[in-house]
Amino acid sequence: MAETATAVAGTGSKSEQAYAAVKARIVDGTYSPGYRLVLAKIAEDLGVSVVPVREAIRRLEAEGLVTFERNVGATVAGIDPTEYLYTMQTLSIVEGAATSLSAPLMGAADIARARAVNEEMRDCLQHFDPVRFTRLNQDFHSVLFEHCPNPHILDLVHRGWNRLASLRSSTFRFVPGRAHDSVDEHETLLKLIETGADADTIEKAARLHRSATLDAYLAQTKQ
Amino acid sequence: MAETATAVAGTGSKSEQAYAAVKARIVDGTYSPGYRLVLAKIAEDLGVSVVPVREAIRRLEAEGLVTFERNVGATVAGIDPTEYLYTMQTLSIVEGAATSLSAPLMGAADIARARAVNEEMRDCLQHFDPVRFTRLNQDFHSVLFEHCPNPHILDLVHRGWNRLASLRSSTFRFVPGRAHDSVDEHETLLKLIETGADADTIEKAARLHRSATLDAYLAQTKQ
DNA sequence: GTCATAGTCATCGTATACGATTTCGTACTC
DNA sequence: GAGTACGAAATCGTATACGATGACTATGAC
């Protein structure tokens, strides 16, 4: 019963465990947006007292994954369309920067790996599986920005992705047509990196890639 | 004795009070970088128990204002030169974005206000006071980015400034020569906004303005 | 029938208490 | 005299307990 909790327990600090466990459940969708996070319940599930859970929730709040209201409680942060827009815009900026900073540090092996992932995505277009596609999409971009030498920026990128992760299948479920373009843009981006394009060009391309996804979503919902 | 704490007490939640109080003391320099934040001591100063203080520290940790080590304690986050570099670079990116997004929403009154602040800075160049100059500098940039319609980006900008605030007098104390150029760049930036330059141009200008400050600092320390 | 009010329940907020861990000082040995 | 081991003090980590707050429900008056 408490197995799932035990599985995460490595760190030692219960506060840390609680943080990891709750975050995992939010990201993997067990706790979907709007879900009411009752401290005592979570504490019981994890086999700890409420104090470490409170701290964990507080940290998640600071990251924007949960919202908190005094004397009322915490809920998993929603996917309010406006919020989605803000998050995507922010991510386009920080991810663009991370990718351009990361690019010159990428080796041939990294590019090959990214390309392999992208080809997998292309295959995936046939019998389209939004969830798998989204996971591959994240893998692809991870390869691109993970070498970013500035840990602050990298952290911001991760936070942005986590925010979006609560959407489970992301935009591609709503705008399947976008997936095809996305794969092509990935290849373009890889070519730019490969040929050592200047930082500004890469940054713009990465930023536009994400903006295009956002635009596709907006066009879809507006009609 | 507990007057300072009481003065902040408006919010109601002790956790919130503790957060505000500690943050204020870090930003205003009472707790300087490296200062050891002992939970029990802070709790006593504020007239609360340690639990709310822990939560406050946790939030400050998530914001990067304090560092925390398990079973050891919290210290005010340092100004390690590397960290300074990362923070400035990150800020150049998010502040550039915030400024460019904010620009089209600024009215003539806002621009006039910014220009007034900048003229004050120019006056300040005579009998140079780094602390005052830095405060004016923040005021100036606040006017520029405060209209940013994306709250996430705005939040990131604020966090960046808070990080730097622990340096009290900022770069200008170390590189006084930079102050003069800075004022000129401010005027250039205002002209761009006034004439409705496109977003990309404004973003680049704002970003470069900050990068130049960073470069001046690096040149100074390297020699 | 609807609105206001009182009372109860669920949940949060904080204090206190105690066990766990680290750090530092001291004494002992080689 | 230097290094190591032991022990005490300081501090953190977590559990438990209780008071406070907000949401919900039922009852009564108009």
Image (cartoon, coloured by chain):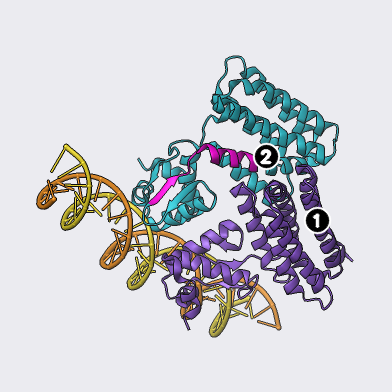
Chain colours: A purple, B cyan, C orange, D yellow
* Mark in the foreground, 2 or 1: 1
- The magenta-colored residue range is B73-90
Q: Nearer the viewer, residue A22 or C5?
A: A22
On residue B92, the disc is 2
Q: Residue at x 73, y 60 (%)?
A: A112
Q: How many marks?
A: 2
**Label 2: how many Cα within 10 Å (few below 14, some 14–19, many 20+):** many
Residue B80 in the image: state x and y as whole percent.
Answer: 50, 38
Residue A87 in the image: state x and y as whole percent.
Answer: 71, 57
Q: Nearer the viewer, residue C16 or C29?
A: C29
Q: Residue at x 50, y 50 (%)?
A: B60
Residue B75 in the image: state x and y as whole percent.
Answer: 42, 46
Give the residue type that dot 1 points to. His
Q: Quadrant of the C terminus of chain A?
A: bottom right
Q: Are marks 2 and 1 in contact (CB under 8 Å)?
A: no
Task: Evaluate whether label 2 is on the same chain as label 1.
Answer: no
Is residue B75 located in the magenta-colored stretch of the structure? Answer: yes
B24 up-or-down from A210: above or below: above
User: Is residue A207 shown to the viewer in this render?
Assistant: no
Q: Secondary structure at mark 1?
A: helix
Q: Nearer the viewer, residue A69 or B194?
A: B194
Q: Residue at x 48, y 44 (%)?
A: B77
Task: Provide the residue designation for mark 1.
Answer: A209
Q: Quadrant of residue A66?
A: bottom right
B118 up-or-down from A205: above or below: above
Protein chain holding label 2: B
Protein chain holding label 1: A
Give the residue type that dot 2 points to. Ser
